[in-house]
Image: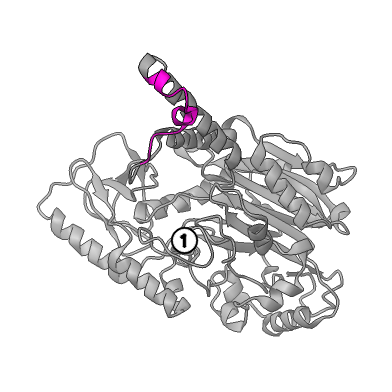
Amino acid sequence: MINQNNSIPDISGDDYLKVLVCSANVGNAEPTPTSFSAWVPYDGEINGPLTNTPYPVGQDEINLSVGPYAANNRNDNCQEGIVQSLATTNEKQKFDIIVLGMQEAAFVNKQKKDKELLDTSIDSSSNNVGGDDTTSSNNNNNNNNIASSPPKSKGFKNPLKKGAKKAAKAGMVMRGISANQTYKRDTASMRNITGALSVDVLGYDNNKLNNLIKTTLPSYEMVTSSLRGEMRLFVLAHSTLAEDISEVYVGAENTGIGSIMANKGGIIVTFVLRDMTRFSFMTCHLEAHEGMTHYTNRNKNLAEILGGAKTDPVYNMQDATITSHHMFLCGDLNYRIKFSEYEAKKKSSRVKKMMGVSFKGPAGLKMSINKGSQGMMKRSVSMESEQDEEEVVEGDSPTKMGGGDEEAIAGEGGEKKDEPANGSHFDQAKALVESKDWKALNGGDELAVALKQKECLVGFSTLPCHWPPTFKVARGEGYQYNEKRTPSYTDRILWKSAEGMTNNVIPFLYEPCPDFITSDHKP
């Protein structure tokens, strides 16, 4: 909620702009209508979600927030008064602006895909038996035997299905290179969401998501919708506010492999409200996996997106964080929980293993200096894998990297692998989740550390996550964590306001969505 007057006016008036920012890693799976409605409140209603939340935003959350908001906040009574008035008012309150940021939001028609796989299997089986007259005559009375797939033994994996899945995913990621879909409102007249989203541009997943939005938010009109590979950003305005929005601009930047692939990157939308206040909204998906190299690359991803996704052509020399009165950032930022005791043990183990080794890195690698380093380090470009969490570092000497207490050390050849995020580290995180020790979990949050040390998103604020980590979970209800990953707060929302406007933003709802069952993240 954004207050223009630094007071406590009537929440139903124009003094407050009520903004809802929703972020979800969809997990490349079609969300069910039930999951979507659990994530996005029907028709933008405020009262229900606010009164039913198990994680209310109170003064503790405000005091423990990270960034300028924590230092400058003077809205203690205002925040509490707003929450109380919103929760108790008889008049149904609705959000004015709703922003939906999605990552890994590309999927295919599962029923159609399964049918195509079955047809491929049938053709393959038919070709195998066609050259044997004896086999063919023996099976004439039972065509089903010919058409069926081979009997599956324990652990059998259909290579056709695996290949089709990879091909489909590759095609989705390529959309970020060859086909970006962006809808922006007509400056002369705001078109209704039905007209804006009715055209099938790139496929099944577009139509499904558009229909879910249209059904869930009937009183809202589309300001802009943008697709970049597997990333999507939708900005909607309530019909009573739509005509007050102008100067809508969209920018995007890829940070995937070679800074070309759109499996990682971000989208930024900027607009002006009532000819005086400039807003920007950004969704992004940063580099995955645990380890100092990936942490450093996430910080770099953010700088690349903000530097490359320029929105307003009038201010093309400055990024949206500078040209906006208020900017909101959401997405799968992939920052992990890292416990210092565990990292110290890893560091000690690596030092012992590397004693007596001559440190010399191969030539021709990208040079970079990290905050807190005593010397220059050379780092190879890291390649992401869904199976292994690998970190590769080369250096002329052992180097302590800024932003943490982990030393990056490598010998001839430069290869170093992180230990799997399981065992004692996973158990430690899980024990804290079970005891609901949110303070301890947030103490190991990489994003909070990065903000405090000004290693990324300088000037941005965020609330602490006083709930279970949102990654990595089994697809289904509740929180069933994958033991190969440290439970972490990867899915986040932050904001930044211009100088003198920090206190104008009043957060009153911040929570995960455990009933979103089709992803390995909780939005």
Q: Please tell me which residue lies in front, 35 or 505.
A: 35
- Counting from the top left corner in percent of width and height, residue 151 is at 38, 38
Is residue 293 positioned above or below 432 on the image? above
Residue nearest the observer in this picture, 509 or 158: 158
Q: Is residue 139 magenta?
A: yes
- In this rendering, position of residue 140 left or right of residue 513: left
Residue at (36, 50) in percent of width and height: 369
Colouring rule applied to residues = one colour
Q: Residues within 10 Å of mark 1 (few under 14, many from 20)?
A: many
**Residue 375 x, y percent position in the rendering:** 29, 52
Quarter of the figure with the N terminus? bottom right
| Quadrant hosting residue 444 | bottom left
Residue 186, quarter of the rendered image: top right
Across and down, in percent, residue 419 comes to: 27, 57
Q: Is residue 361 above or below residue 434?
A: above
**Label 1: which secondary element:** loop
Residue 490 visible to the viewer: yes
Residue type (three-letter) at the residue carrying disc 1: Val
Residue for point 69% across, 45% down: 208
Total marks in image: 1
Is residue 324 visible to the viewer in this orientation of the structure? Answer: no
Q: What span is colored magenta in the figure? A: 135-152
Left/right of residue 357 with respect to residue 366 in the rendered view: left
In the image, what residue occupies the spot 86% across and 69% down? 14
Is residue 344 rendered to the left or right of residue 489?
left
Magenta stretch: residue 63 in it? no
Identity of the residue furthest to the left in this view: 356
**Is 210 displayed left or right of 158 in the figure?**
right
Quarter of the image with the C terminus in it: bottom right
Q: Which residue is mark 1?
A: 473
Vertical order, 221 against 34 (above or below): above
